[in-house]
Amino acid sequence: MYTAVNRNASTISFWSYRLARLCRSRLSTSVDIKKTSTNVDTAQELANIEACKNPRKENEVLPRIQIVRVYRWNPERPQVRPYMQQFSVDLNKCGTMVLDVLTFIKAQHDPTLSFRRSCREGICGCCAMNIDGINTLACITKVKESPQPLVIYPLPHTYVIRDLVPDMEQFLGQFQKIDLYLKRSGEDDYLGMRQILQSPKDRRKLDGLYECIMCGCCTYSCPPYWWLGDKYLGPAVLLQAYRWIMDSRDMAHKERLAKLRDFYSVYRCQTIFNCTKTCPKGLNPGKAIAELKRLLAGLTNKRKSDLDTALPNPCRKE
């Protein structure tokens, strides 16, 4: 009995000693882990700071060089014939559109480069030019990185004022022949006195017509306009003419059609549809010209307006 008690006491003291030692070892291990993790975090943070101060060469952005060839001609130097000037542009240092590239060239390479720009949103139509063989707007044309050079010309078959600036006087002057405003005969005394009503159905007829920004891309891609630009009105002008003829609020469609009933104004169109392919706004001048031909031939007629706007009564001061 005495021996058994001593054995139990010695066993208990042995296991209590082992348990205390195990607890001390675990405590020291956790402390070492915390110290190690703290040291690792500190080292990582110092490494990140060093990397920010001294970036490695392999992390630097490689230049994206694009060759750009631009048409140049200066009227102040008539002895120098028109030529193509070549530039090397890093696309990482400028915007993504062709107009951004031209602006970068003018700012960093050659300040004498001339071109038109205004809205940068495809609304004004000032930056119309020939880019890689297509008439379009420079502000909405994205530059595609390519081993082939980006070739930029002014609008074809125009008189060039300087570099990429074409003479648009004849083109814009032709819009005056179609009267870009509402005509309501006999109502001149009531202008501004009431609203002219238009149904949603009649309004939808103008979709695809009123969006034209008169940039000239379609007109200067039309071969008949190249040959007879002084007589043939061209796709852009005829698109606007059809827009005002089809407007339900306009009352002078017969007068407008009479102005177009000649040998050159409309019928010089050969339905090549270059105008539709190149329009930067996605319009269809070819279809508008075809509808004009149908109206002039009497195959179709303008439909009556769904809503009539009554004249105000001057006696009641309405």
Image (tube, grey):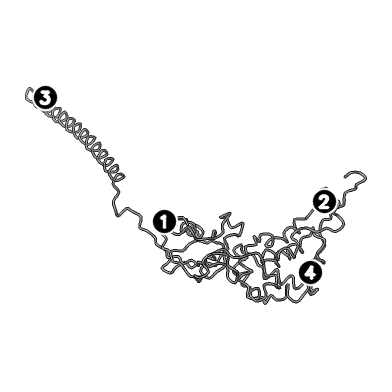
- Residue appearing at x 84%, y 55% in the figure: 308
- Residue appearing at x 66%, y 61% in the figure: 212
Residue type at mark 3?
Ala
> Could you say which quadrant of the image residue 298 lies in?
bottom right
Residue at the disc numbered 1: 92
Q: Which mark is residue 191?
A: 2
Distance between the Cα atoms at labels 4 and 3? 125 Å
Residue 129 coordinates in the image, percent (x, y): 56, 65
Q: Nearer the viewer, residue 47 or 297?
A: 297
Residue type at mark 1?
Asn
Q: Earlier in the sequence, mark 4 or mark 3?
A: 3
Indicate left or right for 249 with 38 as reference: right
Residue at the disc numbered 4: 259
Q: Earlier in the sequence, mark 4 or mark 2?
A: 2
Which residue lies most toward the top here?
2
Q: Is residue 27 above or below residue 160?
A: above
Residue type at mark 4?
Lys
Residue at the disc numbered 3: 9
